[in-house]
Amino acid sequence: PTMRRALWFLVLQPAIQSCAEPLYGRSTNVVEFDPTHVDSILADTRLWAVVYYADWCPHCIHFVPTWEKIAQDFRSEPRVVVGALNCAEHTTFCGSINVEGYPTLRAYHVPGDSKSLEKSGTAMPYNGFESLIKNWIATQVAKLPRMTGPVAPIPGSDHGGSAVPGAKPSSSTSATAIM
């Protein structure tokens, strides 16, 4: 019976995963995006802090409240966007940028770090400690110039951004724009 259950799990796991909602799909703080939006992120001038995750990964599931709290803490900072990409749905892309474990934290537009302007981004510290991650982000934000003028909100969210056609806002699966 144990072997039979294990075989059923292996057969049904892909079907179960494909029905799963992204871990940040209902978030109002974290922007859930897909690989088609990476060029827009690279063209953006704000610091993007991104978690690359797999929706089936226990460490990733456990990390959700921490990433949500970090995103909430930076919600009023227009120079920061906290994002997430589900590598379980985009394995080819994640492999192409060398995401080899989950969760993987990367940043884009880090002052003085040319690697952060590439699709693979630059590594962020990750040891599960919220304070270390928040301090790292705050240190990078302090190096960024102040933004002048209003920043358009992300549709479906109160976080600042500009619309990008085809992206999904994190708080609604039916809208057509984020960032």
Image (cartoon, rainbow, N blue to C red):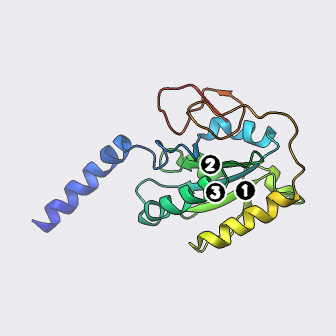
Three-letter code for the amino acid on which mark 3 is drawn: Asp
Q: Nearer the viewer, residue 113 or 63?
A: 63
Please identify, in this view, whether the residue under mark 3 or under mark 2 is nearer the observer.
Answer: 3
Q: Determine which residue is flagged by label 2.
A: 83
Give the image location of residue 18, x and y in percent.
37, 42
Taking the spot 68% from the left edge, 28% from the top edge, the residue there is 163
* Name of the residue lying farthest toward the left: 1
Instruction: Name which of mark 3 and mark 2 comes first in the sequence.
Output: 3
Viewer-nearest of discs 1 and 3 = 3
Circle 3 SS class:
helix
Which residue position is annotated with label 1? 107
For the point 60% across and 56% down, the residue is 51
Task: Please tell me whether mark 1 sits on a helix, a strand or a loop.
Answer: strand
Say few, some or many: other residues with alpha carbon within 10 Å of mark 1 (under 14 / 14 to 19 / 20 or more): many
Q: Quick check: marks 3 and 2 in contact, CB under 8 Å?
A: no
Above or below: residue 54 compared with residue 36: below
Spatial CA distance of label 1 from label 3 is 17 Å
Q: Would you call the spot at circle 3 few (<14 residues within 10 Å), some (14-19), or many (20 or more)?
A: few
Residue at image point 56% right, 59% down: 69
The residue beneath circle 3 is: 73
Q: Amino acid at mark 1?
A: Ala
Determine which quarter of the picture holds residue 44.
top right
- Residue ID at (47%, 50%): 88
Query: Could you tell me residue 106's position as x and y percent?
Result: 68, 58
The answer to which of marks 1 and 3 sits earlier in the sequence is 3
Q: Quadrant of residue 45?
A: top right
Closer to the camera in the image, 112 or 14: 112
Rounded to the nearest whole Å, what is the CA distance between mark 3 and mark 2? 14 Å
Residue type marked 2:
Gly
Splitting the image into 4 quarters, where does residue 131 fall?
bottom right
Counting from the top left corner in percent of width and height, residue 66 is at: 53, 63
